[in-house]
Image (cartoon, rainbow, N blue to C red):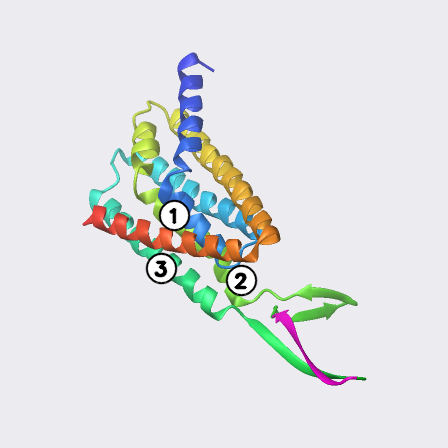
Amino acid sequence: MTIEMFSLLVTGLGLGLLHALDADHVMAVSALSNRKPSLKRTLKFSANWAIGHGSVLIILGLLFFGLGIALPEAIQQIAESSVGVLLIALGLACFWQFHKEKIVLNKHTHEHSQGSIEHTHLHVTDHVVATENGHEQALESPQQVKEAHTPVMVGILHGLAGSAPALALIPAMMQTSLLEATGYLILFSAGVLFSMVAFGLSFGLVQKKLQQKSIRVFNWSRKVIASAAVGIGFYWLAQAV
């Protein structure tokens, strides 16, 4: 491997690490995880977002390198507008989730020596569980399948918008060989994946700690994230117009 090739790959990895932490990327993953927070979901959404982001850049980068063309500006503008709309929708979906979270107050009465006393127990609804060979298995609902695919689609949109084409596609197309272009795109995407998963881990752990320490603060943090997603979404729309 030549020094020039090594420098190119290190540059791609470094730019990918930084690019993943763009405000709109972080906010999109945060808003996706914010609806039903858990460390596992946050890590899954972070990885799926990065997979969508990286796959579209690698496919388009190699296609454009082979054809010798650039990403049409019209497509980039549409993608940027779509990111704005998407962030607004994610923020509003969070608020809707806060409103309709499936919490059931089950009231029933017990007989005591002092008389009848009504107790209120808090139950959180869950998915139906089936049994197979005596073992419980959680059923994967259509909503869960949709949630798994949503971060991938969001990542694809982000791969077409903002600084991604400038940081990934243009440098790849400037290379003289397919190997160099492919190596750059793969290392850039690997940097994005690593950085976003690291963010997801940190974000998930913070949410978990907040949930354990104070439910009130935890709920307020979720509302702040939803509001920020809407605000950044409107900013992106204004920039795209």
Whether residue 185 is visible, yes or no, is no
Marks 3/2: CA–CA distance: 18 Å
**Residue underneath mark 3:** 89
Q: Residue at x 40, y 55 (%)?
A: 226
Q: Residue furthest left?
A: 241
Relative to 187, say whether 138 is above or below: below
Q: Residue furthest front?
A: 114
Q: Give the quadrant of residue 93.
A: bottom left
Q: Position of residue 37 (x, y in %)?
A: 54, 55
Compare residues 107 and 2 and report the one nearer the observer. Answer: 107
- Judged by depth in the image, the label closer to the viewer, 2 or 1, is 2
Whether residue 161 is visible, yes or no, is yes
Query: Quick one: SS at disc 3?
Result: helix
Residue 104 tag number: none
Judge from the rendering whether residue 125 lies leftward or rightward of residue 137; answer left or right. left
Q: Earlier in the sequence, mark 3 or mark 1?
A: 3
Q: Amino acid at mark 3?
A: Ala
Q: Amino acid at mark 2?
A: Gln
Q: Residue furthest right?
A: 113
**Residue underneath mark 2:** 144
Secondary structure mostly seen in the magenta stretch: strand
Asked if the magenta segment contains residue 121, the reply would be yes
Asked if the magenta segment contains residue 190, the reply would be no
Q: Residue at x 79, y 67 (%)?
A: 134
